[in-house]
Image (cartoon, rainbow, N blue to C red):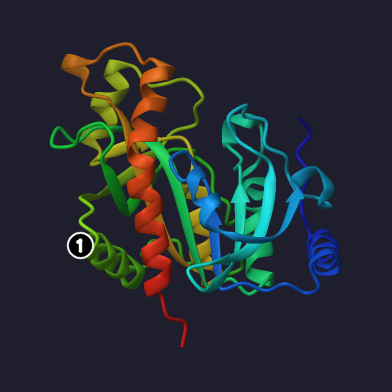
Amino acid sequence: MRKVIRNDEHSKATYDFLGDHTGGFTADIGIILGTGLGGLVKDINIQHRIDYKEIPHFPVSTVESHHGNLILGSISGKNAVVMQGRFHYYENYSHEEITYPVRIMKQLGVKALIVSNACGGLNPFYKKADLMIMRDHINFHYDTPLKNFKFPTYNKCIYDRGIIEVAEKAALENGISIRKGVYLSLHGPALETKAEYRMVRKFGADAVGMSTIPEATVAANLGIKTLGLSIITDMGLPDTLKPAVLAHILEAAAEAEPKMTLLTRKTIEMLSFN
């Protein structure tokens, strides 16, 4: 796949296309529907659904289980732009391409981004189908999506403490058990070996996955308040490690999805942008 450098001319073409096709739609909330959050679509009052392939300069998801639609509508009383299907570094996209939609979200007025993922648990106190709020991350992509930022603030807290507190309150009020931990992202698409699980745990990670960090980093550096949510779909404990079975991973995601969807909907409902 040929990597394409996105520039201001590209983003203007994308923004103009969306404006023409949606009547100038703007949004407060951006959502990236990773594994475990696909059911949220049923709660969205959809005004526009546009195939990624139709949007100028937009990347296209190549993962079979990911849809490829940009959805614009409302949820919990707030306008939202929703990515139904995300992009990964292992799909041979550059970080700039992966994060291009986040830059478009900023142009559409987005002030807060919620992004979800499925990941392997490393913390022995976690279990399958747990929900985890990302309080920090470790980037093992050995690359950064901030190359074109003149003054990146990468060392600041990527995940907004204010939104985390709102999510914690939403969880408490709705009886949803949550964890808070550090998420580490590797290239993928291969899962980790026993030795690699030991290594990333020693670095301080509570969970490991293959996504989210590029989008969250760019969003934070664009001034978008970001919340990262993870579903623990399998446990990466080296001494008791079992072969990963896709069916079991999908079962764990399906078990956790109603809790993730409820938490997301209630968090959005409680957010204020005054």
Vertical relation: 29 (above or below) 251: below
Q: Residue at x 76, y 46 (%)?
A: 51
Residue situated in front as seen by the camera: 33 or 195: 33
Vertical relation: 154 (above or below) 125: below
Horizontal placement of 62 versus 57: left or right?
Answer: left
Picture mark count: 1
Q: Position of residue 93 (x, y in %)?
A: 66, 37
Residue situated in front as seen by the camera: 150 or 228: 228
- Within 10 Å of disc 1 (Cα), the crowding (few <14, some 14-19, many 20+) is few
Q: Position of residue 170 (x, y in %)?
A: 28, 65
Residue at the extreme left of the image, as rendered = 125
- Say which quarter of the image contains residue 80: bottom right
Q: Position of residue 26 (x, y in %)?
A: 67, 74
- Say which quarter of the image contains residue 194: top left
Q: Position of residue 267 (x, y in %)?
A: 37, 66
- Say which quarter of the image contains residue 230: top left
Task: Please tell me whether mark 1 sits on a helix, a strand or a loop.
Answer: helix
Horizontal placement of 158 versus 57: left or right?
Answer: left
Quadrant the N terminus occupies: top right
Three-letter code for the amino acid on which mark 1 is drawn: Leu
Vertical relation: 195 (above or below) 60: above
User: Is any part of residue 158 visible from this angle?
Assistant: no
Residue annotated with mark 1: 172
Q: Residue at x 16, y 16 (%)?
A: 239
Residue at the extreme top of the image, as rendered = 243
Residue situated in front as seen by the camera: 271 or 59: 271
